[in-house]
Amino acid sequence: MAAFRNDYVPRSLACALLAFALAACAAPTIEDEEELGRRAATQVRQHVLVLHDDVVHEYIDTIGQRLVQAAGPQPYEYTF
């Protein structure tokens, strides 16, 4: 049983490190995520009726900015 455990631990660590390395290689960059957000916003504007009301916009923006502040430092610029 001890031989099994000694062989199992290094293999498990190697698999975990390989999985982590592969995930890091596939992770989108900040720029990739920002571009994805821009594309999504464009699609929303093309397919959904967007309300243009300054009072509602200010209210939503205030809530959104409070959420961003509560989340702590972020690498993104949020607009609402």
Image (cartoon, rainbow, N blue to C red):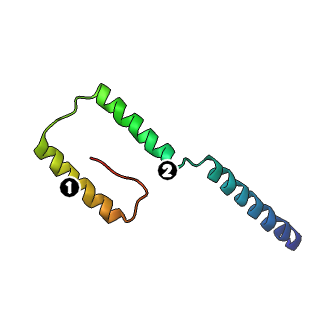
Most extreme residue toward the top is 47
- Residue under label 1, please give it: 62
Q: Residue sitting at 36 percent across and 52 percent down?
A: 77
Numbered badge on residue 21: none
* Residues packed near mark 2 inside 10 Å, few (<14), some (14 to 19) or many (20 plus): few
Quarter location, residue 45: top left
Q: Is residue 20 left or right of residue 66?
A: right
Q: Nearer the viewer, residue 16 or 77?
A: 77
Quarter location, residue 12: bottom right
- Residue under label 2, please give it: 30
Q: In this view, does 49 lie to the left or right of 22?
A: left
Most extreme residue toward the left is 55
Disc 1, SS: helix
Q: Residue sitting at 36 percent across and 30 percent down?
A: 43
Rendered location of residue 13, percent (x, y): 74, 64
Q: Residue sitting at 22 percent across and 29 percent down?
A: 49
Q: Which amino acid does label 2 sit on?
A: Ile
Quarter location, residue 62: bottom left
Q: Residue sitting at 16 percent across and 36 percent down?
A: 52
Please state, as top left, top right, bottom left or bottom right, where the N terminus lies in the image: bottom right
Most extreme residue toward the bottom is 2
Rendered location of residue 36, percent (x, y): 45, 39
Rendered location of residue 61, percent (x, y): 22, 51
Q: Which amino acid does label 1 sit on?
A: Thr
Q: Vertically, is 3 above or below 43? A: below
